Amino acid sequence: MSAAQQQLLITADEYLHDELTREVKHELINGSIYAMAGASANHERIAGNVSRKFGNHLENSSCEVFSSDMKVKVGENFFYPDVLVDCHFDNNQAYFTDTPLIIVEVLSKSTRRTDEKTKFLAYMNMDSVQEYVLIEQDYVDITHFRRKNSWLPEHYFLGEEITFESIALTLAVEEIYHRVNNEDMLELAQTKNG
């Protein structure tokens, strides 16, 4: 690594300090910071649907739902998942958690590689994480990974239900994609109206 590259790397403490004053959110991966791209309406609809369904279900439990402004600390890296559930949140570290139970990412072209590889490898090595969920926004396909199934992918489509076992919640795929404007959902709406 060259001297110029070394100067660009920052520590976790520097990142956390600077992140509080930045206008744009950044993730810290291996000492480098990466700006977070803006989200589409479909991305926000999916994340909002999941967050709302999880939140309503967990309202009277010790588990909490956090959206895309809560960081997850994995070693010296910090990520912003779209939705997470944490049942052991440490209020002494108010800006991040290192004990998520479920992590949900809504995929986009700009985040797909990081979500499917970098983050997945990091999350599966966290003892607390039991489920990792990747949701396509441009078509209906949910990929669900569970620790108890050795992180093997399971896909869910329209007409099916997905169970988040670690919080005992089952949702119809259609509920997750409520109001999403993609070809699969438009076809479903035409079928129902036709």
Image (cartoon, rainbow, N blue to C red):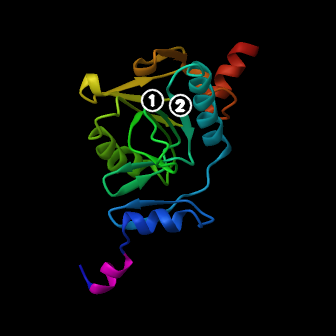
Q: Quadrant of the N terminus?
A: bottom left
Determine whether the residue tagged by mark 1 lies in a helix, strand or loop: loop
Q: CA distance from mark 1 to mark 2?
A: 6 Å
At label 2, counting other C-alpha atoms closer than 10 Å, the crowd grade (few under 14, some 14-19, many 20 or more) is some
**Which range is magenta?**
3-8
Residue 194 visible in rendering: no
Q: Amino acid at mark 1?
A: Cys
- Seen from the viewer's position, the closer of residues 118 and 110 is 118
Determine whether the residue tagged by mark 2 lies in a helix, strand or loop: strand
Q: Residue furthest bottom?
A: 3
Q: Which residue is mark 2?
A: 64
Q: Quadrant of the C terminus?
A: top right
Residue 193 visible in rendering: yes
Give coordinates of residue 105: x percent, y percent. Answer: 48, 40
The residue drawn where x is 33% and y is 41% is 123
At label 1, counting other C-alpha atoms closer than 10 Å, the crowd grade (few under 14, some 14-19, many 20 or more) is some
The residue drawn where x is 40% and y is 25% is 155
Q: Which residue is mark 1?
A: 87
Q: Main secondary structure of the magenta part?
A: helix
Occupied quadrant, residue 45:
top right
Give coordinates of residue 102: x percent, y percent. Answer: 43, 31
- Seen from the viewer's position, the closer of residues 7 and 61 is 61
Does the CB distance between marks 1 and 2 fall below 8 Å? yes
Occupied quadrant, residue 133:
top left
**Is residue 36 positioned above or below 168 on the image?**
below
Give coordinates of residue 68: x percent, y percent. Answer: 56, 45
The residue drawn where x is 64% and y is 41% is 44
The residue drawn where x is 26% and y is 41% is 125
Give coordinates of residue 183: x percent, y percent. Answer: 62, 32
* 139 on left or right of 14: right
Q: Residue furthest front?
A: 92
